[in-house]
Image: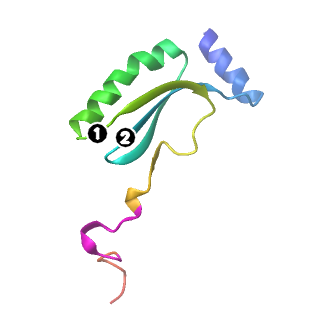
Amino acid sequence: MNNFLGRLLRNIFGRRKAWWVEIKTTHPACTYYFGPFDSEFEATTAKGGYIEDLEQEGAQNIQTVVQLCSDPEQLTITDEWDIPVGGFSSPVFSGRP
């Protein structure tokens, strides 16, 4: 009950901070945010599963930070999605007849 009440009061008074796991990888070049968590212990305990999932997907040079902060604007940040896939510069189904 205390956690719920604390979150409710933080949201009402605009001090929305929670524990987040930030994971950065170099391949793909991404920053991932996992959370929010109520405690540093909870975030630290969960981060191993996220690291394991990224390793299974082939991510390289994984760096993690557990931090108390405001909610991130985006949960996954990368520039790599701006690169066309398969050499196409526009979607195959452009809606043109």
Which quadrant of the structure image shows residue 19? Answer: top right
Give percent across and percent down for residue 30: 40, 46
Measured along the vertical axis of the image, is residue 18 above or below residue 72? above
Residue type indicated by callout 1: Gln
Q: Earlier in the sequence, mark 1 or mark 2?
A: 2
Q: Is residue 22 above or below residue 82?
A: above
Q: Disc 2 residue type?
A: Thr
Give the residues drawn in magenta, as a range: 82-90
Quadrant in which the N terminus appears: top right
- Does 22 appear in magenta? no
Residue 68 marker: none
- Locate residue 81: give its quadrant: bottom left
Name the residue rendered at 39%, 20% in the picture.
46
Q: Residue furthest right?
A: 13
In three-dimensional space, the C-alpha distance between marks 1 and 2, rounded to whole angstroms, equals 6 Å
Q: Which residue is mark 1?
A: 60
Direction top: furthest residue: 2
Name the one closer to the observer, 28 or 72: 28
Residue labelled with disc 2 = 25
Few, some or many C-alpha atoms within 10 Å of disc 2 (few <14, some 14-19, many ≥20)?
Answer: some
Do the residues under discs 1 and 2 have CB atoms within 8 angstroms? yes
Q: Is the C terminus in the top left, top right, bottom left or bottom right quadrant?
A: bottom left
The vertical placement of 25 against 17, above or below, is below
Task: State left or right for residue 14 relative to residue 33.
Answer: right
Counting from the top left corner in percent of width and height, residue 95 is at 37, 81
Judged from the image, the secondary structure of the residue bearing numbered disc 1 is loop
